[in-house]
Image (spheres, rainbow, N blue to C red):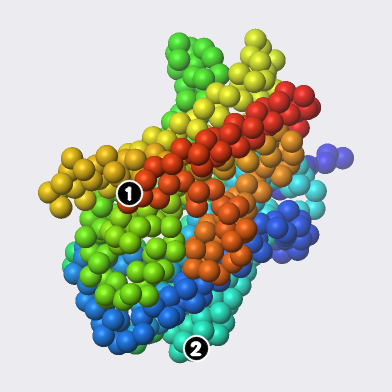
């Protein structure tokens, strides 16, 4: 008698539909356990941030005239429209959630990372094939990942709607904002599932998803700054076009749901027509021999880091141009409110609103630079988890030399991105005011003084990697908490000792105040100690 063995990973059609989804619940519980900290963190933070924005400015616009002035000034500034989108109404709810529209992009990033982590990363590391050799169905992993990410997006939307309504805002507008937030997360989760089927590399899958996100954000920005047509080619633009608190357009949810459904169906179709571990885009074979640049760990680190560094630097340059173009609109946008001037001063800036705006904007760019720094440092974690670092260290490469090659990019990459952003701000601002010789060095200096604060975050990530490599991704949670503390604490929402834990509040508030070296030296010292501890710990521990 001859026994025929069927490979379920390559012939899903030979089994019933229910077999392909077998074990979905078990994998879902596993994924929820693995994300038991990260998932609640990003859903709650993203869901609460719009309400935090509302609470922070509730007392700033006390008259309708100030709201009207804000809306009129915003409508006349292409730079502000490109950064945040249009203000569709002079009602407080519409104006109060204007900048919170950035959460549509933030939740997209969160769902993309979540889906790719539990799909393509599982295949890249071989865990999906191991699990699939049991009674787990072909589509179980993708289904569990999508259920978790979609549920997280829906939960964030519910939290957002309830928290906005609790601030005495109209219920319809609050529900519309929450629905748009959830829809953005679901749409980009489905597109991330498609990207996960494209390549055998999680890095390329993230690049495809984030490249698409960046392109749609650019379409939205150019469209909103122009005649608005291009905005309708962007899911991010659709979320804004729902227009919470401004005669809501509920029908815009239809194309968002349609894209999410099409993306989900396409992901399943693509998964069913490829082998586990493979991708639709074949990997390009490399040259037969390595170039001299790959002769050492620094060359290898450059090869691994250069694409991400280039993308982040271009993004910072573009955002710097937008900030530089928006500076001159700040005074008119604030509507002459003395209360707002006091709040801006509390945020650490001088009484000159334009300089305070640059200070605050660059501090937020420093937080973004910290995100790149964490990503660059986590490359060490990824290389170790995949087993590649063991092969690298088996040669004539020391552990300290290997780690410092990647840490160098985590230190110098944010420096390059921030300084280029500062240059872009200074050039546009200086050209607009006719004072380039003064504004350019001021903006570059404001960016440079934030670098020690960024490097403290780098040090925290390196220390986590050396001491507790399993918990290295917790660095993302640390950064998220710092951003919340800085945003809320600057408005007297938190005790001062909690605000002081955020490194971005300590550098001199340039331009507008005198430079002080003491806080810079303290931050540099803390960063140096943390990096030293992390490198020393890595040299003495076993590889995972």
| N-terminal-most mark, 1 or 2 | 2
Residue farthest along the left direction in this orientation = 434
Residue 92 position, x and y percent, is: 37, 83
Q: Quadrant of residue 293?
A: top left
The residue that appears at 57% across and 58% down in the rendered structure is 499
Residue 440, image x, y percentages: 24, 42
Name the residue rendered at 80%, 48% in the picture: 134
Residue drawn 61% across and 25% down?
A: 403
Residue 110 placement: quadrant: bottom right
The quarter of the picture where residue 152 lies is bottom right
> Which residue: 76% across, 61% down?
29
Horizontal side of 325 relative to 194 (left or right) equals left
Give 329 or 340, whichever is nearer the viewer: 340
Which residue has dot 2 on it? 168
- Say which quadrant the N terminus sits in: top right
**Res. 481 in view:** yes
Image height of 63 relative to 366, above or below: below
């Amino acid at each position: 008698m001859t026994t025929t063995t069927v490979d379920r990973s390559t012939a899903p059609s030979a089994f019933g539909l229910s077999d392909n989804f077998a074990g979905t619940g078990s994998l879902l519980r596993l994924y929820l356990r693995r994300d038991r900290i990260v998932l609640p963190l990003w859903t709650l933070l993203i869901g609460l941030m719009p309400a935090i924005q509302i609470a922070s400015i509730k007392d700033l616009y006390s008259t309708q005239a100030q709201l009207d002035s804000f809306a009129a000034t915003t409508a006349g500034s292409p730079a502000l429209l490109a950064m945040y989108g249009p203000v569709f109404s002079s009602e407080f709810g519409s104006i109060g959630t204007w900048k919170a529209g950035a959460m549509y992009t933030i939740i997209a990033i969160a769902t993309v990372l979540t889906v790719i982590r539990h799909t393509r990363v599982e295949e890249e590391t071989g865990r999906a094939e191991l699990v699939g050799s049991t009674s787990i169905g072909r589509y179980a992993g993708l289904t569990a990942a999508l259920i978790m990410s979609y549920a997280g997006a829906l939960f964030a939307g519910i939290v957002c709607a309830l928290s906005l309504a609790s601030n005495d805002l109209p219920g319809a507008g609050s529900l519309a904002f929450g629905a748009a937030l959830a829809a953005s997360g679901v749409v980009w989760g489905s597109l991330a599932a498609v990207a996960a089927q494209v390549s055998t590399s999680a890095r390329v899958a993230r690049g495809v998803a984030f490249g698409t996100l960046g392109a749609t954000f650019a379409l939205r920005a150019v469209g909103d700054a122009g005649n608005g047509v291009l905005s309708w080619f962007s899911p991010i633009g659709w979320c804004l076009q729902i227009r919470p608190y401004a005669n809501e357009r509920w029908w815009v949810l239809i194309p968002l749901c349609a894209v999410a459904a099409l993306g989900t169906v396409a992901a399943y179709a693509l998964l069913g027509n490829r082998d586990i571990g493979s991708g639709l885009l074949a990997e390009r074979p490399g040259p037969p021999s390595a170039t001299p640049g790959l002769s050492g760990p620094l060359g290898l680190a450059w090869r691994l880091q250069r694409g991400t560094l280039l993308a982040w630097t271009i993004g910072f340059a573009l955002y710097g141009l937008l900030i530089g173009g928006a500076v001159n609109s700040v005074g008119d946008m604030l509507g002459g409110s003395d209360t707002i001037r006091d709040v801006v001063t509390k945020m650490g800036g001088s009484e000159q609103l334009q300089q305070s705006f640059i200070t605050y904007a660059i501090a937020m760019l420093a937080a973004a630079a910290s995100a790149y720094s964490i990503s660059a440092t986590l490359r060490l974690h990824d290389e170790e988890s995949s087993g590649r670092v063991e092969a690298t260290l088996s040669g004539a490469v020391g552990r300290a030399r290997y780690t410092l090659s990647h840490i160098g990019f985590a230190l110098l990459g944010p420096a390059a991105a921030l300084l280029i952003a500062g240059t872009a701000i200074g050039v546009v601002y200086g050209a607009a005011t006719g004072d380039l010789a003064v504004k350019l060095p001021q903006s570059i200096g404001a960016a440079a003084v934030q670098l020690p604060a960024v490097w403290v975050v780098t040090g925290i990530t390196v220390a986590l990697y050396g001491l507790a490599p399993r918990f290295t991704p917790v660095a993302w949670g640390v950064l998220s908490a710092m951003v919340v503390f800085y945003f809320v604490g600057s408005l007297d929402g938190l005790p001062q000792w909690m605000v002081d834990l955020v490194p971005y509040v300590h550098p001199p508030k340039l331009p507008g105040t005198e430079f002080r070296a003491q806080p810079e030296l303290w931050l540099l010292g803390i960063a140096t100690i943390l990096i030293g501890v992390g490198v020393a710990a890595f040299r003495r521990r076993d590889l995972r």
